[in-house]
């Protein structure tokens, strides 16, 4: 499993600390290892169809018996297998013939077949058809009863108006009609209940099988999690259930332990190798809804891997999380009165107070104004105009404008490539990618996201563009720029959906709204520095 570098790496200085897996720039030694893995997988034509759909691979540079080499892994399985010789094995191979997972999976598959057969059973189909027919007949009969009662009442009222009637006889007639209606309704109800009961009895077995399937699947998943016993360099071992127990999710997500990073570290620890640096890259097309670029390096996922890697990396000198380093940036005041203050937030500063020790506009404002409240937000990496309310009334009035989408905003950005369409709109609904926070993904069940755009010019291989966001979803402009169904061209410096650069080239340049106190229109402009 340990591979020697085929190229000369003597000129590459090894890192002093191990890679912080969730936010990193790939070290040159891992880039070299990744190139060798990419060359290998490009030669495997039998994998081409599967790899074209996209898969995450990882490399781990290690020291073993005084030599520097690297290990390779893929996330999940490849061609339905976990035992390809070039790559490290799975932490636990549930795909082995005869393994409890495969056996129980076969039992669950058999239950699925029983459910499908029962759902497609002719007796159930006929019972449902009969129930629908009876339901329609009952509705028609109830309508007839209602009409008959109304006609009888109208007839009696007409006789009363004409003055020729026997009141006692009319009362008896009304009582008779109501009693007859009650009898007919009772018969209708009984007929409908009998038809419904017939269907329910046929469905009962299906529901019992579905409950059994749910119970067996949950038990199988938990037993599988117990088999994933993750090591660290100290030799300490913990299963996935105990690792995830203290987290907010408590139960491991499906696929936990099957990503490239845990596989690599597990094998290295078992073989007594010393981890030096790690990196993961995407190979193939981007999955539908996500933004993944062929050959691009990505951090380890948060949802599945973060709790696991926190355990596995104990005892190793790991680089500090660059996001935790204290940032002392300051916003610049653009406009201010007794109700509001408008600032230019620098790239790298948070809009609101976070869990980490990074300065935020919220903290800056609260130090200066007793009742300061942030009205809207910009991503940490985005610079530009931000409005702060100095009191509750101003905050409420401004928020109503943002909710009603009456605030006019424009952002300027530099895109990595050339966008030939001069202007247009993008409508791609977005939702959080829970396993890769804070990444967003395009999904039919996501929240509506609408952006207008105009190309302003070109610089070498880049496009200068102006965005007019109609909605204000998290990472809206970044995803709409990078996604293949949007502009297909990431914003320069977008290390989440594109490539890292000196900074994210996205700036909130203009903002127009109604002043919360005076009612006058306010338009602020703050030109981008790029």
Image: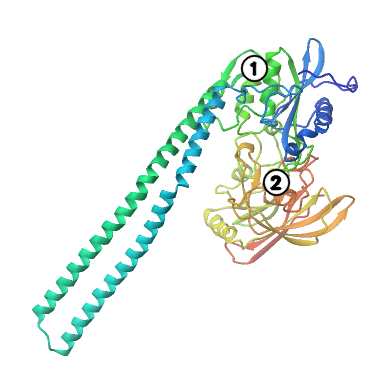
Label 2 Cα crowd, 10 Å radius (few <14 / some 14-19 / many 20+): many
Residue 250 visible in the snapshot = no
Q: Nearer the viewer, residue 473 or 204?
A: 204
Label 1's element? loop
Select label 2 or label 1 by which is in front.
1
Horizontal and vertical percent position of residue 214: 46, 35
Q: Are marks 2 and 1 in contact (CB under 8 Å)?
A: no
Residue at 80% of width from left, 50% of height from top? 415
Query: What whole-number distance in Å separates the C-alpha atoms at marks 2 and 1?
Result: 43 Å
Above or below 524: residue 301: above
Horizontal and vertical percent position of residue 523: 69, 62
Q: Nearer the viewer, residue 92 or 381?
A: 92
Residue at 73% of width from left, 14% of height from top? 273
Residue 40 visible in the snapshot = yes
Tell which residue pokes out farthest to the front in this image: 122
What residue is disc 1 on?
A: 232
Label 2's element? loop
What residue is disc 2 on?
A: 331
Horizontal and vertical percent position of residue 332: 72, 48
Horizontal and vertical percent position of residue 228: 58, 22
Quadrant that contains the N terminus: top right
Left or right for 291, reference 216: right
Instruction: Identify the mark at residue 296; answer none if there is no mark.
Output: none
Q: Nearer the viewer, residue 455 or 225?
A: 225
Where on the picture, by quarter, is residue 190?
bottom left
Q: Nearer the viewer, residue 51 or 293?
A: 51
Q: Earlier in the sequence, mark 2 or mark 1?
A: 1
Tell which residue pokes out farthest to the top in this image: 65
């Amino acid at each position: 499993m340990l591979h020697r570098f085929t190229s000369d790496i003597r000129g590459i200085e090894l890192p002093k600390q191990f890679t912080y897996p969730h936010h990193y720039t790939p070290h040159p030694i891992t880039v070299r290892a990744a190139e060798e893995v990419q060359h290998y997988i490009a030669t495997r034509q039998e994998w081409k169809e599967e790899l074209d759909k996209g898969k995450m691979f990882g490399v781990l540079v290690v020291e073993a018996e005084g030599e520097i080499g690297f290990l390779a892994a893929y996330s999940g399985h490849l061609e339905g297998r976990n035992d390809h010789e070039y790559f490290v094995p799975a932490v636990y191979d549930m795909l082995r013939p005869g393994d409890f997972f495969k056996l129980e999976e076969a039992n669950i598959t058999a239950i699925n077949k029983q459910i499908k057969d029962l759902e497609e059973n002719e007796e159930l189909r006929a019972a449902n058809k009969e129930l629908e027919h009876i339901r329609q007949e009952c509705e028609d009969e109830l309508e007839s009863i209602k009409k008959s009662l109304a006609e009888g009442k109208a007839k009696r009222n007409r006789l009363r108006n004409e003055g020729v009637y026997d009141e006692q006889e009319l009362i008896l007639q009304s009582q008779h009609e109501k009693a007859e209606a009650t009898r007919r309704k009772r018969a209708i109800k009984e007929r409908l209940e009998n038809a419904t009961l017939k269907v329910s009895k046929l469905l009962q077995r299906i529901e019992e099988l579905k409950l059994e399937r749910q119970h067996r699947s949950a038990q199988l998943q938990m037993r599988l999690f117990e088999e994933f016993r993750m090591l660290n360099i100290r030799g300490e071992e913990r299963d996935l259930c105990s690792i995830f127990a203290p987290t907010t999710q408590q139960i491991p997500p499906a696929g936990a332990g099957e990503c490239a990073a845990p596989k690599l570290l597990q094998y290295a620890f078992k073989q007594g190798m010393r981890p030096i640096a790690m990196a993961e890259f995407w190979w193939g097309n981007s999955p539908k809804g996500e933004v993944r670029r062929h050959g691009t390096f990505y951090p380890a996922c948060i949802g599945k891997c973060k709790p696991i890697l926190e355990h596995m990396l104990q005892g190793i000198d790991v680089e500090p999380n660059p996001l935790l380093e204290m940032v002392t940036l300051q916003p610049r005041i653009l406009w201010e009165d007794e109700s509001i203050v408008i600032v230019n937030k620098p790239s790298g500063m948070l809009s609101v107070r976070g869990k980490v020790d990074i300065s935020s506009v919220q903290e800056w404002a609260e130090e200066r104004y007793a009742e300061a409240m942030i009205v809207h937000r910009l991503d940490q990496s985005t610079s530009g105009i931000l409005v702060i309310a100095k009191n509750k009334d101003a905050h409420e009035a401004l928020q109503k404008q943002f909710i009603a989408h009456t605030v006019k905003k424009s952002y300027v950005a530099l895109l990595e490539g050339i966008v030939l369409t001069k202007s247009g709109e993008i409508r791609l609904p977005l939702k959080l990618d829970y396993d890769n926070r804070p990444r967003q993904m395009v999904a039919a069940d996501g929240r509506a996201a609408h952006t207008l755009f105009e190309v302003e010019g070109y610089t070498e291989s880049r496009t200068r563009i102006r965005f007019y966001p109609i909605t204000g979803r998290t990472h809206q402009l970044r995803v709409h720029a990078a996604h293949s169904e949007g502009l297909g061209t990431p914003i320069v410096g977008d290390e989440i959906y594109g490539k890292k650069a000196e900074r994210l080239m996205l700036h909130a340049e203009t903002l127009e709204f109604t002043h919360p106190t005076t009612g006058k229109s306010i338009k602020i402009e703050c030109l981008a520095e790029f």
